[in-house]
Amino acid sequence: MHFLSADQELTRHSYYTATAVRSAAYPPLQGDASCDVAIVGGGLAGLSAALELAERGYSVRLLEAREVGYGASGRNGGQAIHGLACDIDEVESQLGAQDARRVFDMSIEALDLIRSRCRRYDIACDWRDGFLGVAVNERKAASLVEGARHLADRYGYPMTIVARDQVRQWIDSPRYVAAVHDARSGHLHPLKYTLGLARAAAHAGVRIHEGTTVTGLTHTPTPVLNTDRGRVSARQVLLAGNVYLQGIARHLERRIMPVGTYIVASEPVGAELARQLVPSGSAVCDNNFVLDYFRFAADSRLLYGGRVSYSTATPMNLAQSMRKRMVETFPQLQGAEVTHAWGGFVDISMNRAPDFGRLPDAPQIYYLQGFSGHGLALTGLAGKLVAEAMNGDAARFDTFARIRHRPFPGGPLLRTPALVLGMAWYRLKDALA
């Protein structure tokens, strides 16, 4: 796929790569092998499933084309937030109120799962509690507050609605007119967390193979994964490669699009200034359709994300344009330099809902995709759900699998230009508001 060369370039200047120690390397596959479960993809979803299955006594091999945490799992904004990327009303319209509540509750379980895994497996990933949702104008403010009240009333999930005259006490920025605070969500160093989960999985007995590209999948009663280094046969298979499946499951690839998202890191600004700007230390995200998101890292750098590319082309002058947005949000950082600028591709589904299920002609082959930029917490729970399903209890997995998905229109040649035009319209709506 044409986005892969751009993706490789985007990995070079990541703050996460510069500050996470890879204490373990996992050898490539050598020759043919067999196992109970084979997993494609060394991100959070695949690693979570591998860990859960190994602890249930399954023999598991995980195949990763590059290195653990190479994709979105190791490059994202680090924000672990309640809910899904889509509005919960989308789920309710498809599944009904009762199952929509189950889905939402599982998204909260996903947050608790991060905390419990950090404790259980001694993963030091700079976790910090707190998420602050903000709005840039009155229309967005009304939507933000209405959404918070809806979650409290319909889903039993209360958040603090910040009084208008207290917004600057929560975030010292001239841009925002409203805020809501969620103490149960939070943020972390995603690559440290991913590497910690890989260590836990390997310790549980998972055979992780980095540098092993899956080139084909045979849909036999015992599926076979063909790689550039050998073949792996397994009773069950999990496809957790998202936008990196590269042709091995065309049926799935039509339902997601690679969308580039970008982040910069400032130089350290000092703990005192960081506390002044965001006193709660929370991760922050606005509610625009094309949104900005940011947080202070453990070393008091501001990590600021907000540019997206629906054409897969990296925006020009990325560091400079992102720094401009950062300073517009916090004029107090006018003198702070940007030291890192990076990005990656997330797997967007048409309705922004997660896409979990089994291949139609091979029910022993499962897949997890479509996290749509909201997967830091949900990927971990998804791995747990698919492990439950493979172990014979598919009730929770099948609740998600009932969410319907459509392929992007236009086919391989036209769907990207169509998406670019559509997103330009949403950017215009945000600007006019």
Image (cartoon, rainbow, N blue to C red):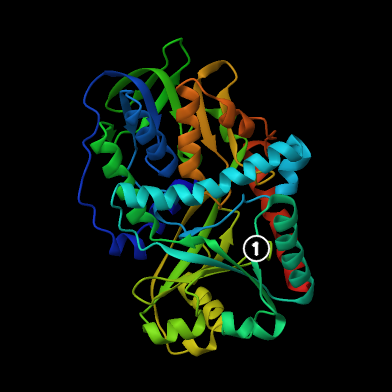
Q: Nearer the viewer, residue 301 or 124?
A: 124
Kind of residue sitting beneath label 1: Val
Q: Which residue is mark 1?
A: 290
**Which residue is at the front of the view, 107 or 216?**
107
Residue 310 seen in the figure: yes
What's the residue at 64%, 64% (across, down)?
159
Q: Residues within 10 Å of mark 1 (few under 14, many from 20)?
A: some
Q: Position of residue 83 (x, y in %)?
A: 61, 51
In the displayed structure, does residue 292 sit left or right of residue 345?
Answer: right
Relative to 269, say whether 117 is above or below: above
Quarter occupied by residue 425: bottom right
Residue at image location 55% in from the left, 57% down from the top: 81
* Image side of residue 179 versus residue 14, left or right: right
Residue 351 position, x and y percent, is 69, 44
Q: Determine whether, in the image, residue 166 is placed left or right of residue 195.
A: right
Q: Nearer the viewer, residue 360 or 254?
A: 360
Residue 426: x and y in percent read: 73, 61
- Residue at 28% over, 42% down: 200
Where does the image place residue 317, in percent across and percent down from the top left?
A: 49, 72
As drawn, 428 above or below 412:
below
The C terminus is located in which quarter?
bottom right
Q: Is residue 70 visible?
A: no
Left or right side of 15 for 378: right
Label count reads 1
Residue 255 drawn above or below residue 82: above
Query: Of helix, strand and loop, which one carries label 1?
Result: loop
Q: Which residue occupies 35% across, 35% down?
A: 51
